[in-house]
Image (cartoon, rainbow, N blue to C red):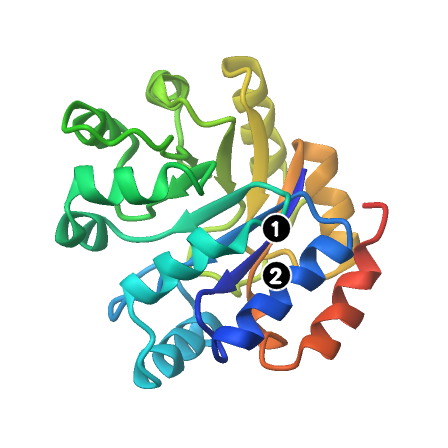
Amino acid sequence: MKGIYLVGGYPDRAGFMECCRIIVEKGFDFIEVGIPFNDPIAEGPVIAGAIGEALASGVTTAGVMEDLALLDPGIPVYAMTYANIIHSRGIRRFSAEMAPHLRGVIVPDLPNRMARRFRDEGFAIPIVPFATLDTRESDIGTVNESESDFVYFVGLRGITGGESDFTSRELVEKARMLRRGTDKKIIIGFGIKTPEDARQAASLGDGYVIGTEAVRRQGDPAALGAYLGQFAGL
């Protein structure tokens, strides 16, 4: 299960849609779409820069949501957003508008234990739980409460675009702990840049997400296609 993260509406609406088409063409299993937000706390300079450009060009939450409703790529789509965006739109309204178009949402500033509050308030889209290098066995119960089909395992301490050692004892042992504690698929993100990174990540879990290196090429669909072609069969 391998996916690609893109910034919604970047570099423009047509370019974003073309990049989504290329992701499907290259055989990836899902698309993660970041809704631009003016305080992207999880993002490194490449993705944060693209988000800033998107916002400066007039990309809005409503516009990205419209694109997501039109996308229909034939593979699952997940939205990466922040709690403020969902609250501002309205928990029930966001859920009603996007539930038909999303397999799940990824909310990096929402602790796993808080997801139940969203559900209690009528949020019907599965919220993808996070695991990190600091996750403890006692935390896995909140992971299993989610209706999501996978857990997003952050493979490094820090923001997107950093370096991760997928052979480190700490990371390997944490992946094994997750495997023992949950039946969800384990998808590893942050730090995956090369086919070798992807192979190592896939050996620890059930797949991976490429973010920074995809966004770095998002302004040039041909370059993105050439880059993603390296991951065929992985």
On screen, residue 195 versus residue 52, left or right, reads right
Point 42% across, 57% down: residue: 158
- Label 1 Cα neighbours within 10 Å, binned few <14 / some 14-19 / many ≥20: some
Which of pointers 1 and 2 lies earlier in the amino acid sequence? 2
| Circle 1 residue | 73
Looking at the rendered image, the disc whose residue lies closer to the viewer, 1 or 2, is 1
Q: Is residue 57 visible?
A: yes
Residue 44 image offset from top left, x and y in percent: 43, 69
Tell me residue 39's x, y (percent).
25, 67
Q: Quadrant of residue 196?
A: bottom right
As displayed, is residue 117 above or below residue 202?
A: above
Image quarter of residue 23? bottom right
Which amino acid, mark 2?
A: Cys
Q: Amino acid at mark 1?
A: Pro
**Above/below status of 179 relative to 51:** above
Q: In the rendered view, does 1 fall on the left or right side of 7?
A: right
Q: Quadrant of residue 215?
A: bottom right
Dot 2 falls on a residue whose secondary structure is helix
The residue at 42%/59% (across/down) is: 34
Mark 2 = which residue? 20
> Which of the pair 159/114 is nearer the observer?
114
| Up-down relation of residue 79 to residue 176 (above or below) | below
Q: Quick one: quadrant of the N terminus? A: top right
Residue 107 image position (x, y, % from top left): 33, 45
Q: Is residue 26 left or right of residue 117?
A: right
Image x and y of residue 174, in percent = 54, 30
Q: Are marks 1 and 2 in contact (CB under 8 Å)?
A: yes
- How many numbered discs, if any? 2
Q: Which residue occupies 56% across, 37% down?
A: 170
Q: Residue at x 40, y 31 (%)?
A: 135
Q: Quadrant of the C terminus?
A: top right
